[in-house]
């Protein structure tokens, strides 16, 4: 199939040194390459030179095919396969890929966010929220999941508990034993008693913590080991984002994601919208990619 674009006829006429009427009368409907080839066969030295330039001269291709015009880019892209269009994505600027996310619904954005590697999802979330805000907004079952994760050693938790007011530690012990704590013990002694519990008792004591103290414990552990924030479920993060942030904030925050993950998101657009996103890329890079990767597409471009 031929691609119809607004080829710069005046520029072509000037380059070949022939009249516009000759193009209209003899070469109507033929591709630029066919016209150049025919003129070269007739000994037109300008055509011979132009044929060589079409393979190497980016500025010439941009001018001749009017690639500065997004509509011409779109016409070319509309005839490409999905895989051919994918060749352009790694060469696009991140800001243009991020803008393309506007074509997705908030629900779809959150579904794609859940599919991100945990490290990328956490980075994305912390672009919109502080660590303290995330922990405060996390459901209690997620805080419990965090504290029970095998990555976190009991000693890490006990170290943090030592700085907690003794009355809260006493409540934790009493919630498991059912008996009031005897004597006037300080945080160090109470922490030592918690450390002596068997694993199930210790786990129960953590589950029974007051909400504010549990949040503070999780926050402090997370600050010391930021990778532990990846313990929270992806859906927990996206629920917080969806309920607390508007779509423009979410799209802006996506700028922290690595290029490859933005590309994977954009690849989920239908072909017509994918083509629109690619028209935003730098014109010179677009032309270079077209010439280098897709010469068969260039051969389809014809004059109107």
Image: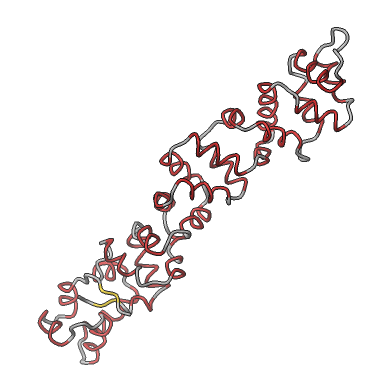
* Total numbered circles: 0
Estimate the x, y position of residue 171 in percent, counting from the top left: 78, 17
Identity of the residue drawn at 82% across and 12% down: 186
Looking at the image, the residue that sits furthest to the bottom is 42
In percent of width and height, residue 300 lies at 32, 78
From the viewer's side, name the closer residue of 61 and 196: 196
Q: Residue at x 34, y 60 (%)?
A: 279
Residue 267 vs residue 17, the one in the foreground: 267
Quarter of the image where one finds residue 287: bottom left
> Could you tell whether 298 is left or right of 111 in the image?
left
Left or right of 295, for residue 196: right
- Quarter that holds the N terminus: bottom left
Residue shown at the point (85%, 12%) measured from the top left: 180
Report the side of 119 relative to 165 (left or right). Answer: left
Taking 233 as reference, is 169 left or right?
A: right
Q: Residue furthest front?
A: 178
- Front position in the image: 230 or 236: 236
Q: Quadrant of residue 151?
A: top right
Residue 4 in the image: state x and y as whole percent: 26, 74
Place of residue 125 in the rendered image (x, y in percent of width and height, measured from the top left): 54, 39
Q: Residue furthest top?
A: 184
Q: For residue 23, which quarter of the picture?
A: bottom left
Q: Quadrant of the C terminus?
A: bottom left
Check the image and tell me how it is coloured: secondary structure
Residue sitting at x 62%, y 46%: 118
């Amino acid at each position: 199939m031929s691609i119809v674009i607004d080829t710069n006829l005046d520029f072509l006429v000037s380059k070949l040194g022939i009249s516009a009427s000759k193009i209209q009368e003899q070469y109507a409907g033929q591709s630029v390459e066919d016209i150049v080839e025919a003129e070269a066969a007739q000994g037109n030295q300008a055509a011979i030179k132009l044929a060589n330039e079409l393979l190497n001269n980016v500025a010439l291709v941009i001018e001749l095919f009017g690639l500065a015009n997004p509509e011409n880019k779109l016409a070319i892209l509309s005839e490409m396969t999905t895989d051919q269009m994918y060749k352009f994505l790694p060469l696009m600027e991140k800001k243009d890929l991020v803008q393309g996310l506007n074509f997705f619904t908030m629900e779809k954005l959150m579904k794609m966010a859940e599919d991100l590697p945990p490290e990328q999802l956490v980075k994305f979330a912390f672009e919109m929220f502080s660590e303290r805000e995330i922990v405060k907004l996390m459901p209690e079952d997620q805080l419990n999941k965090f504290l029970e994760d095998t990555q976190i050693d009991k000693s890490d938790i006990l170290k943090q508990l030592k700085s907690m007011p003794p009355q809260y530690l006493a409540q934790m012990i009493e919630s498991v034993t059912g008996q009031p704590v005897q004597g006037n013990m300080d945080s160090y002694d109470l922490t030592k008693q918690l450390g002596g519990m068997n694993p199930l008792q210790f786990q129960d004591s953590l589950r029974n913590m007051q909400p504010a103290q549990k949040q503070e414990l999780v926050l402090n552990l997370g600050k010391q080991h930021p990778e532990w924030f990846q313990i929270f479920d992806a859906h927990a993060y996206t629920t917080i984002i969806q309920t607390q942030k508007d779509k423009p904030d979410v799209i802006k925050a996506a700028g922290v994601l690595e290029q490859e993950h933005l590309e994977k998101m954009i690849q989920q657009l239908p072909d017509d919208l994918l083509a629109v996103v690619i028209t935003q890329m730098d014109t010179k890079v677009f032309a270079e990619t077209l010439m280098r990767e897709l010469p068969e597409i260039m051969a389809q471009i014809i004059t109107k």
